[in-house]
Amino acid sequence: MRDIMTKAKWLLTISLFFVSSTGLQAETDDSSPAFELVVLGDSGGIQDGNLSAFLLRSVTEPNYVALDAGTLVNGINQSVKQGAFDDLAIVDDDKWGKAGSILRHHVKGYLISHAHLDHINGMLVASPEDSKKSIYAIPSVNTMIGETYFNGKAWANFSDRGIPPLLNKYHVVDLLPGKTAPIANTALHVTAFSLSHPVESSAFVIEHGDDIFVYFGDTGPDIVEKQDKLDAIWTYLAKQVKHKKLRGVIIETSFENERPHNLLFGHLTPELLMGELRSLATKIGGEKPLQGLNVVISHIKYTLAKNVDPRANITKQLDDGNDLGLNIIIPKQGQKLLF
């Protein structure tokens, strides 16, 4: 009996190892996580203080890359309160508080999907107290950031490119679609792909060794946009997963299924997302090839309308349409996830 109880306690300890009040181990057939994700902002649309932004790092190092930066400092503060960084060996800096040390010492760069304000606002307003690091984006996005924000009018030019005076805090790096590049001061590499949106958007395939994580900025579906940009990403991933492990995907679902296609403005619904992921499954082949894939839903549009809960409605529609066996995750600001 004592041996049985000891074994039960051991199994319970193992099952709880990756679960805490601040985060959870996303389902995977490999119990050892490869990536840590901290949710700085989980929503799209009008609610300032909680806009699209995530921090991603390999669990082998203490350095993050930001996946968009709609909300930055407030997201870090909320994540600190919820204990998302409790396991991080934070650099001790006499000048800066905990959030400042995380931003300045542990966030090593920004992957910016597109230049809409709800994806870049946090980086802009934090720039006066940020540290030197790189901004990675496809060329059209970097150009728009410089022309629209870092122009000496909307905001001082904290970058090393564009309209003088240049403050040279941020090194601007152009990512050529389909070409893999290192993310400085991390062990991560990234490959960017163009996405369909009113302004050009992008997705980032992030790799560490044989592990892959994918972040999608705002995107319309191929069936509406008629540009086959998502098809190009699915083709790439279908080849990669033959010898690498796809740990997780962050992809937007902005509107409910009832939204007319002509009013999507370059966004997805649950039904359209499932259609796109079925395309990926077909390219991979086999029986239920996406079974258990971690799919984190981002950019659910917030509304001020009465008696309307888009998050609850979209969650139900995603669950109802999930015939692929996906592990669908609706993230919350401040949460830590392991993949």
Image (cartoon, rainbow, N blue to C red):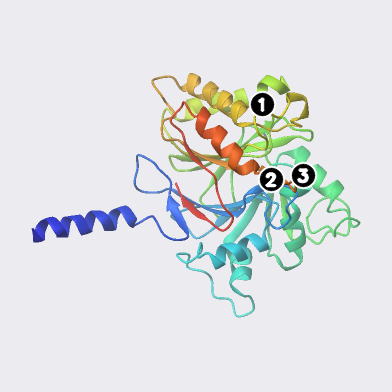
The reply to whether the C-beta atoms of the residues labelled 3 and 1 are less than 8 Å apart is no
CA–CA distance in space, label 2 to label 1: 29 Å
Nearer to us in this view, 169 or 94:
94
Q: Which residue occupies 43% across, 52% down? A: 24
Q: Residues within 10 Å of mark 3 (few under 14, many from 20)?
A: many
CA–CA distance in space, label 3 to label 2: 32 Å
Q: Which residue occupies 50% across, 20% down? A: 283
Which quadrant of the figure contains the N terminus? bottom left
Q: Amino acid at mark 3?
A: Ala
Q: Amino acid at mark 2?
A: Asn
Q: Which residue occupies 10% across, 58% down? A: 3
Whether residue 187 is visible: yes
Find disc 3 in the rendering and name its residue.
115
Question: Element type at marker 3?
Answer: loop
Q: Amino acid at mark 1?
A: Pro
Nearer to us in this view, 257 or 331:
257
Q: Which mark is residue 307?
A: 2
* Comparing labels 3 and 2, the label whose residue is closer to the camera: 2
Whether residue 251 is visible: no
Find disc 1 in the rendering and name its residue.
221
State which tag comes first along the sequence, 3 or 2.
3
Residue 275 position, x and y percent, is: 57, 23
Determine the residue located farthest toward the bottom in the rendered image. Answer: 94
